[in-house]
Amino acid sequence: MNSTKNFAIIGVAGYIAVRHLKAIKETGNVLLAALDKFDSVGFIDSYFPDADFFVEFERFDRHIDKLKRGGKKVDFVSICSPNYLHDSHIRFALRNDLDAICEKPVVLNPWNIDALQSFEKETGRRVYNILQLRLHPSILDLKKRIDEGPSDKVYEIDLSYITSRGNWYHFSWKGDEHKSGGIATNIGVHFFDMLTWIFGGVKSNTVHILKNDKAAGYLELEKARVRWFMSIDFNDVPKAFQEKGQRTFRSITVDGDELEFSGGFTDLHTQTYQAILAGKGFGLEEARTSIETVYNIRNASPVGLKGDVHPIAHTIK
């Protein structure tokens, strides 16, 4: 029996899509069709030169149906489209009797999860989310340490994530909160997923700064107190790192000790695909807490620099 699975991908021109193409290829499967309204996708040749490519959703939709009727059914749709389109594209997959593998954030609003879970039951298909930090060796080691540690211990965590972006960001869909979910959702949702996965549910969620290019706040989790800061502004990168020519600064400290996880990211999508193909992927329910967390951050009224504030937030002018 042939175990090779057929894939289609939506949003293939996006920067993250190449990790999905690599994962499909490395797991021994085939890409039959790709969709993106942008046609600068020559890199597909390095992975699946025979894949059909579409710039119009209607023709892509028709092609997926044609493949099904011709006995060459697609099994999975990988979704790498802008965040606000995820819900619609997942529904497209389920309606066409396909499982969906969706980039984070799987949806923008918590109630979208409820609706998609109902849709899963109606169709018998599954929605899988990319939560790759849960597979990172350093994160797995940390979870093991916390799980085996004192059950009543509350950890002190500082999360800093600054990933500089140019002016283009604000003119793209990423800079539109209604399309991306804003800064905490777009660049931070996987960190909030990782923290709540390890340290438990959210007891309180306070936002100190909420702007289009940076945000900061305080999360009280069941087993941790978290001061967090996220930014796409190069000026927020610590000066010592700027002087080295670095445009990104990423740091997580647990009780003052730095968690080293700068490497080890290259194969996490492939590992995610392997788990999904083995029936062990992360579904909608696993994404719920992080989606609720970033939704609440996005809709919060910032309180200013009061209480437990991340140190970098105090340097913002």
Image: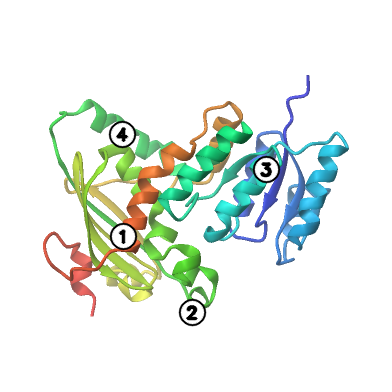
Q: Report x, y in % for residue 293.
A: 33, 52
Quarter of the figure that contains the C terminus: bottom left
* Coordinates of residue 177 in the picture (x, y in percent): 44, 68
The furthest residue to the right: 70
Coordinates of residue 2 in the picture (x, y in percent)? 78, 24
Quarter residue 231 falls in: bottom left
Residue 143: assigned label: 4
Q: Determine the residue positioned at 57% across, 36% down.
A: 120
Label 3 and label 1: CA atoms lie apart by 32 Å
Callout 3–callout 1 Cβ contact below 8 Å: no
Local crowd size for mark 4, using a 10 Å CA cut-off: few (<14), some (14–19), many (≥20): some
Of marks 4 and 3, the one in the foreground: 3
Q: Which mark is residue 95?
A: 3
Residue at which label 2 appears: 167
User: Closer to the N terminus: mark 1 or mark 2?
Assistant: 2
Amino acid beneath label 3: Arg
The image's mark for residue 33 is: none
Q: Secondary structure at mark 3?
A: helix
Q: How many marks?
A: 4
| Residue drawn at (86%, 33%) of the image | 71
Give the residue pinned by disc 1.
297
Real-space CA distance between mark 2 and mark 4, rounded to the nearest whole angstrom: 37 Å
Q: Nearer the viewer, residue 265 or 301?
A: 301
